[in-house]
Image (cartoon, rainbow, N blue to C red):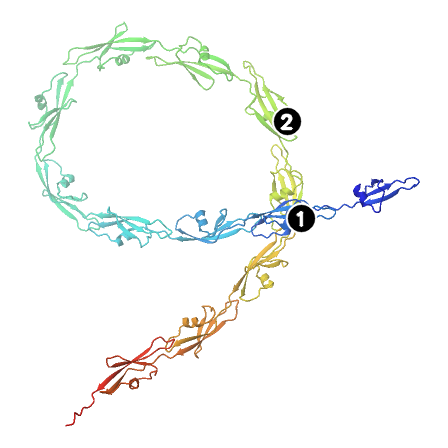
Amino acid sequence: TAMLFASLGGTPDADGEWTDNGDGTWTYTVAATAPCTEEAVSVVTVIVVDSPDAGENGTLTICEGEEITTAMLFASLGGTPDADGEWTDNGDGTWTYTVAATAPCTEDAVSVVTVIVVDSPDAGENGTLTICEGEEITTAMLFDSLGGTPDADGTWTDNGDGTWTYTVAATAPCTEEAVSVVTVVVVDSPDAGENGTLTICEGEAVTTAMLFASLGGTPDADGEWTDNGDGTWTYTVAATAPCTEEAVSVVTVIVVDSPDAGDNGTLTICEGEEVTTTMLFASLGGTPDADGTWNDNGDGTWTYTVAATAPCTEEAVSVVTVVVVDSPDAGENGTLTICEGEAVTTAMLFASLGGTPDADGEWTDNGDGTWTYTVAATAPCTEDAVSVVTVVVVDSPDAGENGTLTICEGEEITTAMLFDSLGGTPHADGEWTDNGDGTWTYTVAANAPCTEDAVSVVTVEVVDSPDAGENGTLTICEGEEVTTTMLFASLGGTPDADGTWNDNGDGTWTYTVAATAPCTEEAVSVVTVVVVDSPDAGENGTLTICEGEAVTTAMLFASLGGTPDADGEWTDNGDGTWTYTVAATAPCTEEAVSVVTVIVVDSPDAGDNGTLTICEGEAVTEELLFASLGGTPDADGEWTDNGDGTWIYTVAATAPCTEEAVSVVTVVVVDSPDAGENGTLTICEGEEVTTTMLFASLGGTPHADGEWTDNGDGTWTYTVAANAPCTEDAVSVVTVVVIDSPDAGDNGTLTICEGEEITTAMLFASLGGTPDADGTWTDNGDGTWTYTVAANAPCTEDSVSVVTVIVVDSPDAGENGTLTICEGEAVTDELLFASLGGTPDADGTWNDNGDGTWTYTVAANAPCTEEAVSVVTVVVVDSPDAGENG
């Protein structure tokens, strides 16, 4: 009210009352004091001035090198800031936006935008990688071949033409990827060919030409051979960088021996001995080859011939003479029959031999009933004569040794069983007698010349047979363990207790009592096990339903694991779980219980339809689309581009839900600015740069409403401002290349000595200024030379300068001469000068050499450097002499 009262005009009474009229005005009423009857009324209109709004702090992300504009900064603010504020660069990567307060507001509004600069991609500089043929190219090798300091997160592409492209993708907001190229140079690896074999004749020299021709493949011809000293030669081709491994191959030299038939020899053989090639070969002298052939000459000699193997051509021949010596005679084999126990004598044995054996042999008992008679061979015979006498011994009767026969209860006794029970080696032709007391006698009769029968006795013992009882039945509950005690109690009869049980796997168990020798058949009985099923409530399970779906007992039963009984009952536990109970049937006493946990799955939510406005060329991302949806959509949906500027967002239903959720975002694209593509403008030195020339140098189809900026470094930037919602201006750069105009220098003068040759180097050094060195000289024929430097496009006018040549006379001392004077006559300069030949300069000096010669020297004037010299020889003629008066 104080503010309202102060807004009144005049000098109002201070005891009035204020009323808010609700329309932005307030009424001030001062009541009338008697005798006055009319109250006083005035109105104050309240005008509300908006406070300044600088929006909310924001962040602007730009690409390295991108220019910051106020439009970009303003678009980065949050809220709805006033547009009439001012921006201040704080110098620390932040910009402050200030909106001044309008009276009666007194506090300015301030917000800050933080600028984040993202590095532009760097793919380094083009490079070259030199590798060895067959060497695998790795990305590490390619990366090391790049120049500069490339980023390490790029990707390599094999261009298929020996080059690889390295691409570093731009990270938003940067849009242009960086690219560099590595050229791969492949150096041939050394080739030593393939291992080979060289076959030569014994004694033949090995040459490198022979070795090289033995290699396989196509070996390089610049390798070196090494004799390994073991019959092999190694061929090594050195590697040329960057190859590091030399190539190596080996030639194995096979030396074919020349044929060798050995030396002539003598072979002494025993009478009747067959001549073999082995015997003949062993008779040869030397070290003959073993692959020759023998020929019987029919006169007691044999010829041995070894054919030559290529490359050898001459066969080798030797001769063996055969000498035959009588062989020993041991008679013919015979037989000597004696009685068992009778001694064998050498006389009995010799008399048993056939034929006419030599009497100086020796007898050997072979220990197997035969005796060998050996007559030793007399050299050169090597095989003794041998005959054999077989001694036949007539056996005495043998009934073996007394024994015991153990049989099973009820088993019949046979003679075979009795015979097997005897000890020793009884003859099988004896007879058995049952003595009636559990024993049996075995008698073998004697054969001549033996006279006493042989007798032995077998005692018979009887063993009880096994008893497994009678078959039975055992009833158990499902899951109850079967024990051998339960099974044994189920058998009938009186089974032996030392049997073994076997589970047959079909609900029966077999009880087996093993037979004790000599019984061979075990006793067997069977117990059938009857299993009563225990109740089965299945296994705990999980039932997943869709939000709002009702739970049924059929759904719950289908969620159980295993094979539950169908006669159980369900109980809702009230905590999201249901219990299934199956009662036990006798003899089982424990009921079966399982639990199903019910999980409720949310139905899908794709949010509400929305609109996304983007700048031309800006990628539509799922993040932008998702932010354009209304509501609270699920984040796990999928986007589909309909190709008509709309995108469908589909959230799939998660089982057991079956209906997917769908919403649509419409994308509105605003054209982005186009500054064209970077270009190059080539001008001649001194030519003025115009915006028309710059614009024509741009590539692409740039918009014509941009502005040019001279960067001061030979480049001009063309900027086309972005229209909202686009925030990035389009920028391209034209590089101005200034071609130097030709410079032939300033005119000059060249002073030379008479006779000195004029060179272009002398002429060039005579020019003034700093002339280009690529001009051409022209001799004008009047003592001047013209130097012309041609103009390079875009320059059109050649540059020309002239050198004037001044020739200085060289000194001339004339030609050597002779001065003849009369004895006693004085030598003068005039006389000497007149004696010179040619046209000598007159400003020379004379020097008396003291040997009757005088040297005339004319000094050189610059630029001449060599003085001229000539010599006059003085000849003195004797003066006439007329003698003295008389």
Q: Secondary structure at mark 2?
A: loop
Residue with the most extreme top position: 437
Question: Badge 2 is on which residue?
Answer: 551
The x and y percentages for residue 361 are 8, 27
Crowdedness near tag 1: few (<14), some (14–19) or many (≥20) residues, C-alpha within 10 Å = many
Hey, which quadrant is residue 578 in on the image? top right
Q: Which residue is mark 1?
A: 98
Q: How many marks on residues?
A: 2
Nearest the eye: 515 or 8: 8
Kind of residue at badge 2: Val
Numbered disc in front, either 1 or 2: 1
Per the model, the C-alpha gap separating discs 1 and 2 is 63 Å
**Quarter of the image containing the N terminus?**
top right
Q: Is residue 412 visible?
A: no
476 in relation to 258, above or below: above
At a point 15% along the width and 43% down the height, the residue shown is 287
Q: Quadrant of the rendered structure where residue 386 is?
A: top left
